[in-house]
Image (tube, helix red, strand yellow):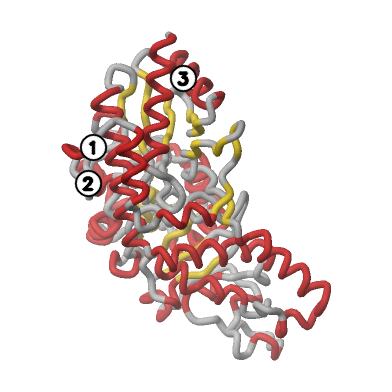
Amino acid sequence: MTAATDFRADAEWARAQDRADPLRGFRDEFLIPPHGDVGQVYLCGNSLGLQPRGVRQALLDELDDWARLAVEGHLHARHPWLPYHREVRDGLTAVVGAEPSEVVAMNSLTVNLHLLLVSFYRPTRERHAILIERGAFPSDRDLAASQIRFHGYDPREALIELDADEPGGTISMTAIERALAEHGGRVALVLWPGVQYLTGQAFDIAAITKLAHARGCVAGFDLAHAAGNIDLALHDSGCDFAAWCSYKYLNSGPGAVAGAFVHARHARETLPRFEGWWGRNEATRFEMRPEFDAAPGADAWQLSNPPILALAPLRVSLELFTRAGMRALRAKSLRLSGYLEWLIRTHLGDVLEILTPEEPERRGAQLSVRVRAGREAGRSLFEYLTAHGVLGDWREPDVMRISPAPLYNRFEDCFALAEAVRAWRAQT
């Protein structure tokens, strides 16, 4: 990784880094939104990834096969529909660090988490609490609170929200360990993010899993901001389950099909589960037997036929990830975020405060920043950047998230952001 002492705040240096980037060709695989006569500086892949160029043709191919083959497309389409979810299995396995039987693409993120909690949140009178972070993404809090109520308990007592204990609103492993030491005897489930959506903090999934299991708790993870972003080794981590969306770093389109992980050791267990016929064993599914014969591994959590038109973009995107490799992508991401951090701390420290942890292993692509002059100044800067073709995103009350995604972002994009902030500072 480029050392901070080698960074330079000039456009030619940034362009030279981009020319030397072995992954530079992947940018051409994406459609960059226009801004005037040039492409937008798009730094919002943490919210919605860009469209891969291959998606349009992939969708047209499926539509053509539907028109040409109708029901026969289940067996004879270019990518047969019946086993279509297997088309994305290897790609997902590589992205999240799992065994093939442990992952499945299905539904949307919160639906998957609810389905997984049916199996893994089994509260008792003595142990019925769920531990989450305070300031969790609202859908995760809603999910946990509604599951607690569904089982007849009160979220005011059973939903434990861990406060941040570090500057910028981040949470130390010490705080998580303390919370489990204090509450572990009544915690049934720890539901934690892989990367916290607001601060951009990345967590050590294996370490949290170990702490949870030591206290007799199930460990599950929301990887919405982690999948396709940071190094994940879900199988080796030992976590019980995880789920993620694929419209952020996985570039599969708005509302894209999500993913789920169930650790292989649970395949040998009889777990309660909501069931549907696509969760039946593929070898006997069409025998239409009355009894449920579960598919092996995570496939058993499927309910319905795979949505082909929604899976096609994910298939295209995962092919890019396979070609690039997560290790190379993560290495480039660390260089990009390191350069962006250096630009902010060295040249814009009077304007911006970085909330995301400084340690590279505790963050992904995203840097969350706050304008030191307050919320109104923050909104002014965000609107200025947007008007000048530099797009991050805004989260209330006063945080701007900037995410250089390594598949399509460049050092030049980071430098362009810094130049735009300087221009705004000069006019205010």
Q: Which residue is mark 1?
A: 7
Measuring from the top left, give residue 13's x and y in whole percent: 30, 38
Residue 159, relative to residue 236: is it above or below? above
**Picture layout, residue 371 above or below residue 121:** above
Q: In the rendered structure, which amino acid carries the disc numbered 2?
A: Thr
Count of numbered tags: 3
Q: Please, what secondary structure does the residue beneath circle 3 have? A: helix
- Which residue lies at the image location 42% right of the left edge and 40% below the top edge? 403
Q: Is residue 25 visible?
A: yes
Name the residue: 24% across, 45% down: 360
Front position in the image: 38 or 149: 38
Q: Earlier in the sequence, mark 1 or mark 2?
A: 2
Q: Which residue is mark 3?
A: 381
Near-viewer residue (266 or 195): 195
Residue tagged by mark 2? 2
The residue most toward the left is: 5
Gap in angstroms between the C-alphas marked 1 and 2: 7 Å
Residue 214 at x, y = what percent?
22, 60
Q: Residues within 10 Å of mark 1 (few under 14, many from 20)?
A: some
Visible residue check, residue 154: no
